[in-house]
Image: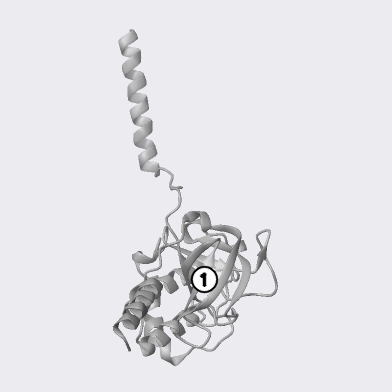
Amino acid sequence: MRLSHVLALGAALSMAVSAAPLPFSAVGDDKAIVIHSKAHNAATNGGGFNATVDGNANALVWCIDDENFVNVPDSFNANVVAFEAWDGDKVRKGNNTTWKDGEDYTTLQRYQAAAWLLDTFMFSNLGNSTVMKDVQHAIWDLTSTTSTLTSGGNTYYTQALGFLNSAASANYGFGKWAVISGPSLNGELSKDAKQTLLVQVEAGPSTETPEPASMALIGAGLAGIALYNRRRKA
């Protein structure tokens, strides 16, 4: 292979690995999704796909669902729901309480664990087909309601459960990850399901509210200012 071909292949792989997060404007109902090609073949029907999301090309979306599928190529509208703006009604299985593994974790927690597996193991092992397959199977084990557990992913699945039981999982992926769930129309999911996917997004506008202790300090400060002003007038 010529050096120019090697460099071109390396550039293509680099783009696929380091796709920029989507702008937060891509989050919302009925966003246009176009699946172009398979970027990383972690397993049959799994791995990462090159996609366009809400007009943003070069998006990299990741399979977290072994019960539904997307075609290559494919196009559909879907809800893009950021972790920090979770709405179970907008996500397939978003309010589900029964899972194949019998563990008592919410849908959001399971998708957070899937994102953690991608961040921690998948991205650092792209090209290692054994690790990629096992991580993909672990993700499917976390998110399945019908499939039997796969032996290959159990090591990573067990580590994901440890992550979910740690304090680090509480707000994991907030301002970084979103779920793609479709097809949708006016925010409502259709019966003809497409594969649920994860995609990285930029952090949105802060929606944090002051904690009670902070509110108490603010109130005390205002009261002090009022008392000071009354004394000055006296």
Percent x, y of residue 164: 40, 71
| Residue projecting furthest to the top | 234
Please give the residue where the numbered disc 1 appears in the rendered image.
51
Name the residue at 38% across, 73% down: 17
Q: Quadrant of the N terminus?
A: bottom left
Query: What amino acid is labelled 1 in the image?
Result: Ala
Residue 93: image location, x then y, percent: 59, 71
Looking at the image, residue 26 sits to the left or right of residue 89; the answer is: left
- Between 221 and 78, the one lying in front of the other is 78
Q: Residue at x 57, y 59 (%)?
A: 87
- Compared to residue 184, the image places residue 157 above or below, namely below
Q: Quadrant of the C terminus?
A: top left
In percent of width and height, residue 134 lies at 41, 87
Residue 77, image x, y percentages: 63, 65
Q: Is residue 162 visible?
A: no
- Name the residue at 46% across, 61% down: 22
The chosen color scheme is one colour
